[in-house]
Amino acid sequence: MAIRGNHDKVAAGIEEGEGFNEAARIAALWTRRALAPDNLAFLRDLPRGPREFAPGRLLCHGTPLDEDEYLMDVDDARRCFEARPFDVCFFGHSHYPGAFVLEGNRITRRPAAGDEAILEIVEGHRYLVNPGSVGQPRDRNTKCGFAVYDDRTRRVLLVRRAYAAEMARDKILDAGLPRWLGDRLLVGA
């Protein structure tokens, strides 16, 4: 299952990127010109989140309340937990891997640490889980981040892996895109 993100919307022509910083807007519009028509159609057809992929399990881009909203702190997490029923919600947008866990009335933030972290899904607790970013980590870790979720074992594996960031940076620069977009890959910011 896939859902759209803010850059998908601009690249597909659904939006024009008015709220983007200039470098991000340039890159999204470059992507719009570079993609084949069938790829653009794929992006245009991606559904808006949140989407329920199993009972009590959601997938969203920003928050379960707004696909373009950043979920950054415990106050943001509390609003999401209070506004919408779910057991586990996977979200992205901020690119910071980890989770917010609601246990009773207490919310804790659990940043992902190391190259692999296991999050046990405990019955009665609620979770907002961010797998991080494959292509643009922002937590000063240059490795890409992703998650593997197993509903059977009730575990989320948060993973970090090295990738060819320098090669990606060179391709960004060769395309004539803003240098900052490539350089940030080498520092994870």
Image (cartoon, grey):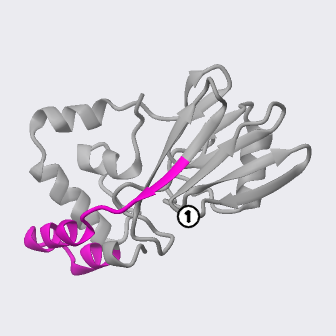
Quarter holding the C terminus is bottom left
Q: What stretch is highlighted in magenta?
A: 158-184
Residue 64 rendering spot, x and y as whole percentages: 61, 40
Q: Would residue 160 be found to the left or right of residue 114 on screen?
A: left
Would residue 122 appear left or right of 174 to someone viewing this image?
Answer: right
Pick out the residue farthest to the right. Answer: 104
Find out whether residue 160 is within the magenta segment. Answer: yes
Q: Residue at x 42, y 28 (%)?
A: 1
Residue 121 counted in the magenta span: no
Most foreground residue, 65 or 85 = 85
**Residue 145 in the image: above or below residue 120:** below
Amino acid on which the number 1 mark rests in the picture: Gly
In the image, 104: left or right of 18? right
Count all numbered tags in the image, as a single digit: 1
Q: Residue 123, can we see it? A: yes
> In this view, which residue lies farthest toward the top?
55
Please state the horizontal and vertical placement of residue 66, each as a whole percent of the image.
Answer: 57, 45
- The residue singled out by tag 1 in the image is 114
Q: In this view, does 23 lie above or below 36?
A: below
Q: Residue 46, relative to residue 18: is it above or below?
A: above
Q: Residue at x 57, y 25 (%)?
A: 52
Among the 4 quarters of the image, the one containing residue 183: bottom left
Q: How crowded is mark 1: few (under 14 residues within 10 Å), some or many (20 or more)?
A: few
> How far across and down, in percent of the image, does residue 178 sit?
21, 76
Residue 90 makes an appearance in the image: no
State the residue at coordinates (84%, 32%): 124
Residue 22 x %, y %: 30, 72
Seen at 37% across and 63% down, the residue is 136
